Amino acid sequence: MFLSPMLLQRSDEPLNQEGYISELKLDGIRMIYSNMEQLRLYTRHNNDVSQKFPELWDAGIPKGTILDGELIMTDHKGHPDFEAIQGRFQVSKTMKIQGLSKNNPVHFCAFDILYHEGKSVMKLPLLERKRLLDSIIQENERVSKVRWLKGKGSELFALCQERGLEGIVQKKADSVYEKDSRSHSWQKVINYQYEDVFVIGYRKKEFGWILGKVENGVTRPLGVTEFVPPKARRELYQAAAGFVTNETEDAVYLSPKVCCTVKFRNYTKAGILRMPVFVKFVQ
């Protein structure tokens, strides 16, 4: 049984208001853990991925339960590793999945309960649902509960900045679970990194600016941003006419003259900016 999950609004600043709780935002894959008539694991887009993660089939979650949470893998520091969980998610061969489930298992971190003993509890206040979650989860090497704090958004966000974690989630303590909805009752604050980079080209068919930096006289590509407001797009195209160095069927390449600030999640292991977003041009 699939339920479309409750989604978060974006916030620029952490809150320290009464009536909110704060949690770490785990850098993984959103998952609905549904153990009703039979166990099913779903992504937020209703993809059944039960066969990909056999290590979660016997995690001790009782029948009649539906949980919302994050599927993660961790790095050598114990931090969630998004590239690792993405790599595991993309494996499709049964024999390889079986080997990975034993030698490199995933971990499900539950932060909400939607069904308990076969009945919906989504209309209960969040803190009551948290107590139900505590009552049914016996933490083990495959499943755990996401820890939360009353208030203290700024303190938790400062910890994320210090340790290079993804960010925090802040939720109204009395909020109901609004399935298939993006609600202001839940807000995320992302720990973005910022960097000045060059626009070294742009795609012709699907929009995207190609980003790069110059190191020892050599231009190194850093990936593509698709998140640029219309005004900035027009400004680039006006300025770029004199900087074209090459053109192919798919892209126009520019000399590194136009510099801009982008915000992004982190560098990938290949040295590419993850999810870069245009902030401003640098004069």
Image (tube, helix red, strand yellow):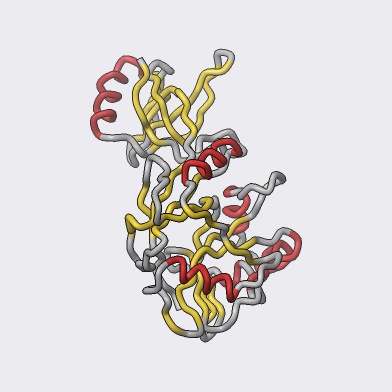
Image quarter in which the N terminus is found: bottom left
Q: How far across and how far down the image is residue 112, in percent?
A: 49, 67
Q: Nearer the viewer, residue 22 or 44?
A: 22
Compared with 60, 152 (above or below) is above
Q: How far across and how far down the image is residue 274, in percent?
A: 50, 39
Compared with 257, 192 (above or below) is below
* Residue occupying image coordinates x 40% and y 73%: 124
* Residue occupying image coordinates x 57% and y 40%: 159
* Residue occupying image coordinates x 37% and y 47%: 10
Extreme-right residue of the structure: 103
Compared with 260, 12 (above or below) is below
Q: Nearer the viewer, residue 181 or 174?
A: 174
Q: Nearer the viewer, residue 237 or 117?
A: 117
Q: Is residue 32 visible?
A: no
Instruction: Give residue 262's quadrant in the image.
Output: top left
* Residue occupying image coordinates x 28% and y 35%: 229
- In the shown orientation, is residue 95 left or right of residue 181? right
